[in-house]
Image (cartoon, rainbow, N blue to C red):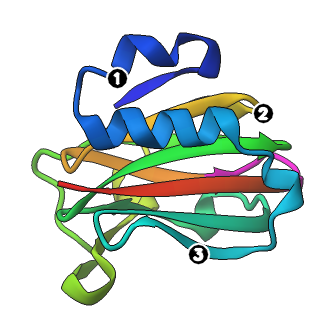
Amino acid sequence: MIVDTLDNRDLYKHIHPRIAQALEHVAQTDFSLLDVGSYELDGKNLFVIVNDYQTQPKELTFFEAHQQYIDVQYVASGEEEFGYLPLTDQTPSKPYFAKHDYASYDYLANKNAASFIPFKAGMFALFFPQDLHMPGVGLTQSNVRKVVIKVKI
């Protein structure tokens, strides 16, 4: 997992050309002008999901992990927290679903090992397959516009 601001995006472009493309797309796009939905950048290799939602208490959501894609998550507006936990010996509460590339993991079973990190507008996070993450968490309900760019591994 990597968490940083867009000002430092050049530090991470060497990881993979599609990650570089994703970070540059985030930096160059005014997401307030886009409708909620999915947008292709490079077919199934690189696509964007724009979503508006309200944060939820951590007890009402779950950790997720992906196998086919790296998540580049960017908070375009609002503020949330996200949960983080390294994928080691956890057992999924719902097994991996290849069509949607995720397995889910119960928060309560992992709450003592989890870390929660503030995630504010202008910040991005990279989540790799070994990173369990719980997006959309808030102590109080808050409106968030989140952009997720899925980067094919």
Q: Which numbered disc covers residue 13? A: 1
Residue placed under numbered mark 3 in the picture: 38
In this rendering, the answer to whether 60 lies above or below 72 is below
Start-end of magenta stretch: 136-143
Question: Taking the image as drawn, is residue 31 in sight?
Answer: yes
CA separation, marks 3 and 1? 23 Å
Residue for badge 2: 121
Rate crowding at label 3 as few (under 14), some (14 to 19) or many (20 or more) other CA atoms within 10 Å.
some
Amino acid at circle 1: Lys
* Residue type, numbered disc 2: Ala
Q: Is residue 138 magenta?
A: yes
In space, the residues marked 1 and 2 are separated at their CA atoms by: 21 Å
Tag of residue 50: none
Give the mark, 2 or 3, whose residue is nearer the N terminus: 3
- Which residue is rendered at x = 66% and y = 40% of the image? 81
**Left or right relative to 102: residue 33:** right
